[in-house]
Image: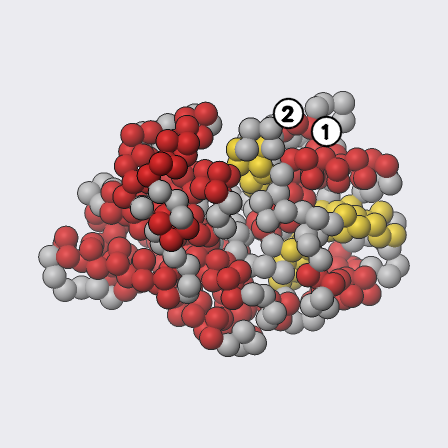
Amino acid sequence: MNNFEFQNPTKIIFGKGEIAKIAHEIPSDKNVLIIYGGGSIKKNGVYDQIMAALKEHHVAEFSGIEPNPNDTTCFKAVRQIHDQDIDFLLAIGGGSVIDATKFIAAAAAAGDADPRSLLGTIEVASRALPFGVVLTLPATGSEMNPAAIITNTSTHEKTVFKSQHVFPQFSVLDPTVTFTLPPRQVANGVVDAFTHVMEQYLTYSVNHKLQERFAESILLTLVEEGPKTLANPTDYDARANMMWCCTMALNGLIRYGVPNDWATHMIGHTLTALHGLDHAQTLAIILPTIMEYKRDKKRDRILQYAERIWNITEGSQEERIDAAISKTREFFESLGVKTHLRDYDINEDDIPKLIGQLRDQNLTALGEHKDITLEDSQAILEESL
């Protein structure tokens, strides 16, 4: 197992009716800015619960965070923070709202520095405003990690922002608030979490047996519980298991001490940036293709995945690998998430611009071995048609 350091300071408050506890997590003398997206929280009762909990606090609001948050919107929130002397943020939503809040928290505390200089940076931000989270859309794990994806509107690039200063102080996870989510968002959440795990699991062994078992338990739970969340939206146990899987998939527990891939995400980001696909849709397209394209390098791990997740034990190695890839694609399709570019009206004429985006972002050596070149990325996209 590789050397690593692991610390996760986020407090998780999990369960039905737990939103009320935010009153005890935010000091009453704080000026709080609640940050959310399109306003669905005012239809599903979450907004009312939060305002009731914060009745002793001074509360301001910022709405309009996009599904793929952009820097322009974030900077509007920063100006409001400065104008109204805000000193605590509360993100209410899914990964996009939480990601935006992380960047806003750091940008608002940047002092004399140009907050635009934080875009696309790793561990550059030296401070951030404190913030908490009320999770309404489980998918990305952003509620318990220090990373965010922000779109640079001037370049149309999805950029990674990361800082140890933007761990949420707390995150409230109430499965009941997910009961009214549209099926598409629920399915996307399952695919997102599944792929997060695969990016950390489907690499090569460094004798990290505990992380392997942790990862496999998340995958198995998603396979078992994911379809239940779609079949019965008010199945509390299924929603609770799925919600916790999404958090555990990307809070560092299975990441540290092991090789990581992330090529699926990097290629997928270009599809969102240039074609507006949901993040999970891009993952469902690219992951099975990468499994096929890198089947020789990933052979041992795909065979282990085939046996432990899908109970595929018969046939030659090649047949078992084929079956595992097919099972992965079938699982995504069973959730209603399509797995080919043609399903989204993207064709071979679109691929050069996608490759140009990867080139412009210097994403020219992807994967756990850094051996996926631009030529390989082009081949992967072509095979994803």
Point out the residue furthest to the left here.
316
Residue 277 in sight in this render: yes
Residue 186 position within the rendered picture, expressed as x and y whole percent measured from the top left: 51, 63
Q: In this view, does 96 lie above or below 105?
A: below
Amino acid type for the residue under numbered disc 2: Ser
Report the label total: 2
Judged from the image, the secondary structure of the residue bearing numbered disc 1 is loop
Q: In which quarter of the image is residue 295?
A: top left
| Labels 2 and 1: the sequence-earlier one | 1
Check disc 2: other Cα within 10 Å, few if <14, some if 14-19, many if 20+: few
Residue 196 position within the rendered picture, expressed as x and y whole percent measured from the top left: 43, 50
Residue toward you, 238 or 45: 45
In the shown orientation, is residue 15 left or right of residue 273? Answer: right
Q: In this view, does 236 lie above or below 19?
A: below
Q: Which residue is drawn at 37% across and 66% down?
A: 334
In the shown orientation, is residue 107 left or right of residue 255? Answer: right
Asked if the residue under mark 1 is in contact with the one under mark 2, i.e. CB atoms within 8 Å, the reply is yes
According to the picture, the residue beneath numbered tag 2 turns out to be 117
Numbered tag placed on residue 110 in the rendering: 1
Q: Which residue is drawn at 31% across and 51% down?
A: 288
Q: Residue at x 41, y 65 (%)?
A: 335
The N terminus appears in which quarter of the rendering? top left
Residue toward you, 25 or 33: 33
Q: Residue at x 57, y 41 (%)?
A: 148
Q: Quadrant of residue 264?
A: top left
Residue 140 position within the rendered picture, expressed as x and y whole percent measured from the top left: 53, 52
Query: What colouring method underlies this structural image?
Result: secondary structure
